[in-house]
Image (tube, grey):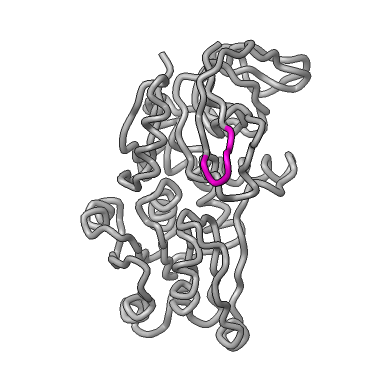
Amino acid sequence: MKSFWIRHEGDNALLEAREAPVPEPGPGQMRLRVRAASLNRGDLLGAIAFHRAAAGRLAGVDAAGEVDALGAGAQGYSRGDRVMVRARGTFAEYVVVDPALATRVPPHLTWEQAAAIPISYVTAWEALVQFGRLKAGEWLLVAGASSGVGVASIQLGKVLGAKVIGVSTSPQKLEKLRALGLDVGVSARGEDFSAQALEATGGKGVDLAVNLVGGTVFGACLKSLGNFGRLAVVGYVDGVMKTEFDLEATHGKRLEIFGISNAPLTPAMRAEATVGFNRDVMPAIIDGRIVPVVDRVFAFDELPAAKAYVESGAQIGKVVVRLD
């Protein structure tokens, strides 16, 4: 089968097309005929130790497609079912997946839309609901608002009844995000944006900040928080891994700071997140309150070009490759 592998040379992540055998599902597993897969910055970053693969591995971490084969004892799905799933090695014609991490694709969604959902919206659920405890009427700040998880966070925040501030380097992107419900757009490139966040909230500060950028905005996110505020550190696409930490504000405001990463999760923890996503997010996707945002679709053979496009930072939402 056709597949793409990723390997790292220093801080560079390289994609290589390779022929690979079609995998066979083991006990409790199922095989997916992949129809579309989306790109995720975390999987493609070479500068981060969690994601490095010097010897190479199958690339891709989420996809949508049809159940093609079932291993012994696999439950919940049948051959031909349309599903979307988080799994390693989704940049391939076939991938073996855990049914506990799969979700049925609603009939109205295209393969491309379905492939844009799993990682971004499960991550947004973890940051906003599972650990962020966002409530109706609270203020949410999303730094890196035009990314896949950023768009998902804006959409989920509005479904939860929050007021949302989005931070982006592009005023044009912020204007487009207003159509998704963004209440306040802040254009900033490396500078402290906390004054705008405090002004938008009437001096109170935000209740939850989601940092999808990295160290360059950590301080501004922290300063934007009000009393009992929470800060989710989800990504560091800026490559800045270390930054100053304000102990006085953290102590005085009783702030909470937590990370969101798939790396340390057990299979049971990943399954728990899928259950929460299915319960709290999927109803809004099914009834149309949340519509996945697909910026651009590439052919599967164009995956290296799709990677370059993602790395340029031009997209709003997700970039997807289609397998015919």
| Figure check: 239 above or below 207 | above
The quarter of the rendered structure image containing the C terminus is: top left
Quarter assignment of residue 163: bottom left
Residue 286: x percent and y percent?
Answer: 42, 36
Quarter assignment of residue 192: bottom left
User: Camera-side residue: 48 or 227?
Assistant: 48
Residue 36: x percent and y percent?
Answer: 44, 24
Residue drawn at (41%, 19%), measured in percent from left and top?
301
Q: Does the magenta stretch include residue 10?
A: yes
Residue 71: x percent and y percent?
Answer: 73, 15
Residue drawn at (39%, 55%), measured in percent from left and top?
154
- In the displayed orientation, state which residue is furthest to the front: 10
Quarter assignment of residue 294: top left
Q: In this view, does 182 lie to the left or right of 115?
A: left
Residue 38 in view here: yes
Residue drawn at (46%, 36%), measured in percent from left and top?
39
| Figure check: 128 above or below 277 | below
Q: Is residue 281 magenta?
A: no
* Magenta stretch in the rendered image: 7-12
Most prominent secondary structure in the magenta stretch? strand
Residue 122 in view here: no
Residue 293: x percent and y percent?
Answer: 34, 40
Give the number of callouts.
0
Q: Is residue 147 left or right of residue 172?
A: right
The quarter of the rendered structure image containing the N terminus is: top right
